[in-house]
Image (cartoon, rainbow, N blue to C red):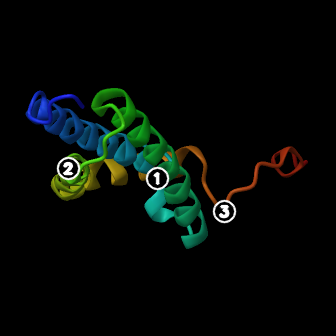
């Protein structure tokens, strides 16, 4: 940047907001794909893919908004936004996860096999 003090607070707020939005997207996909109820391998794969895309977008935003200058305050703002939202939504999302899990289990029961020959016994 030409002047370090110009738009520093604005960039801080933008990256804080980006951290909040990315955590909301993370929680949404976690609920949608029922990640907490999956095996550890699926959780690790999901987290790896999500955090790789997130890091690519973070690098893009640093290049686009801060002219490629990586500063500690911008990274701190992003991590702060992500962690604060993760802590605040931890208890709020439990209800939605349980609701979605029960709906999913009603639509696709695990033990029941759909076989047409068993239902047409004569």
Residue 57 vs residue 105, the one in the foreground: 57
Please state which of residues 10 and 110 is positioned toward the viewer in this rendering. Answer: 10
**Residue 10 drawn at (x, y percent):** 12, 30
Q: Neighbour class for label 3 at 10 Å: few (<14), some, many (≥20)?
A: few
Q: Position of residue 38 (x, y in %)?
A: 54, 64
Camera sees residue 43: yes
Residue 44, located in which quarter of the rendered image?
A: bottom right
What's the mark number on residue 111? 3
In contact (CB < 8 Å): disc 3 and disc 2: no
Gap in angstroms between the C-alphas marked 3 and 2:
37 Å
- What is the quadrant of residue 15 in the picture? top left
Q: Nearer the viewer, mark 3 or mark 1?
A: 1
Looking at the figure, which quarter contains the N terminus? top left
Q: In this image, 65 relative to 45: left or right?
A: left
Question: Which one is in front, 62 or 20?
Answer: 62
Secondary element under disc 3, as helix, strand or loop, is: loop
Front residue of this view, candidates 18 and 37:
18
Residues tagged 1 and 2 counted as in contact (Cβ below 8 A) = no
**Would you name the residue on which mark 1 appears?**
51
The residue located at (21%, 51%) in the rendering is: 89
**Label drawn at residue 63:** none
Exactly how many numbered labels are in the figure? 3
Between discs 3 and 2, the one toward the N terminus: 2
Q: Secondary structure at mark 2?
A: helix
Q: Secondary structure at mark 1?
A: helix
In the figure, 44 relative to 11: above or below?
Answer: below
Rate crowding at label 1 as few (under 14), some (14 to 19) or many (20 or more) other CA atoms within 10 Å: few
Give me the C-alpha separation between circle 3 and circle 1: 34 Å
Q: Provide residue 97's location: percent of width, then percent of height.
A: 35, 52
- Please give the name of the residue rendered at 22% of the width and 46% of the height, measured from the top-left corner: 74
Q: Residue at x 31, y 46 (%)?
A: 70
Q: Which mark is residue 85?
A: 2
């Amino acid at each position: 940047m030409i002047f370090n003090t110009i738009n520093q607070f604005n960039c801080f707020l933008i990256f804080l907001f980006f951290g909040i939005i990315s955590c909301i997207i993370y929680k949404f996909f976690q609920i949608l794909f029922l990640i907490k109820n999956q095996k550890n391998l699926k959780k690790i794969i999901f987290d790896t893919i999500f955090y790789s895309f997130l890091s690519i977008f973070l690098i893009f935003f640093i290049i686009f908004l801060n002219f490629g200058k990586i500063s500690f305050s911008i990274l701190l703002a992003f991590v702060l936004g992500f962690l604060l939202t993760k802590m605040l939504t931890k208890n709020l999302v439990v209800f939605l996860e349980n609701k979605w899990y029960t709906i999913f289990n009603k639509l696709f029961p695990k033990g029941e096999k759909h076989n047409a020959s068993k239902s047409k016994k004569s």
